[in-house]
Amino acid sequence: MTDQAPHQTPVTETDLARLRDAIAVSRRSRDRGQHPFGAVLTDPSGAVVLESENSVPADGDCTAHAELKLARAAFQAFGASALAGFTLYTSAEACAMCSGAIYWSGIGRVVHAMSEARLGELTGDHEENPTMALSSAAVLNAGQRVVLVAGPALADEAAAVHEGFWN
């Protein structure tokens, strides 16, 4: 018996490497003047097949979160049945909107670096990121299929990209 929540999976060394890839994408997003969030997608072999930067506020679309954009591109490229074996890695836990998109896309596993609660501590009441007190696991596993969740892991590394951004 473990202390893990239902559908929670352990974080592996490979997961840590891919989370660092997602954190690097978040850093690139920030360097381009966008919110500091990033995501990568791996196929069942563990190869990175897609990545996505947040493009809020640069493109004027408040829904242009890295995870939502990645879920959309993944569904278009691979389809829901194939995505069951894929993993989405994200620098910060997916919000409720992004978690819904991940669920609907068919992606089978999500690993996040920093929790939504930790993100809320960093962003405070910033109007561009009204963080919700709702875990991605709660959204991802409220439906008819299971989505495995792992994290947080590497929260301090992910949080470092946010330092000074939300002030």
Image: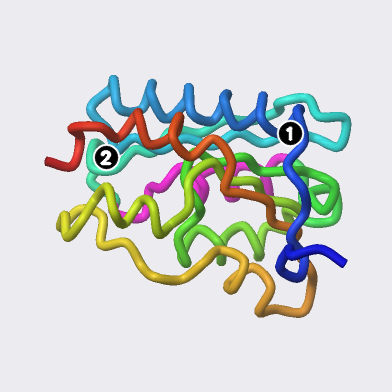
Question: On the rendered structure, is 142 left or right of 25?
Answer: right
Q: Position of residue 37 (x, y in %)?
A: 40, 38
**Quadrant location of the N terminus in the rendered image:** bottom right
Which of the colour schemes (rainbow, by chain, secondary structure, one colour) is used? Answer: rainbow
Residue found at x 73% / y 63%? 4
From the image, tell me which residue sits under label 1: 42
Above or below for 105 versus 122: below
Q: Position of residue 43 (x, y in %)?
A: 80, 35
Above or below for 61 versus 113: below
Judge by depth and name the residue closer to the eye, 3 or 43: 3
Q: Main secondary structure of the magenta part?
A: helix
Magenta region: which residues? 62-77
Name which quarter of the figure residue 2 lies in: bottom right
Q: Position of residue 94 (x, y in %)?
A: 50, 55
Residue found at x 50% / y 58%? 98
Question: On the rendered structure, is 166 left or right of 84?
Answer: left
**Quadrant location of the C terminus in the rendered image:** top left
User: What amino acid does circle 2 point to?
Assistant: Asp
From the image, tell me which residue sits under label 2: 59
Residue found at x 68% / y 51%? 150
9 falls in the magenta region: no
User: What amino acid does circle 1 point to?
Assistant: Thr
Question: On the rendered structure, is 138 left or right of 129?
Answer: right
Residue found at x 66% / y 30%? 16
Name which quarter of the figure residue 48 lies in: top right
Name which quarter of the figure residue 95 lies in: bottom left
Q: Badge 2, how many Cα within 10 Å: few under 14, some, many 20+?
A: few
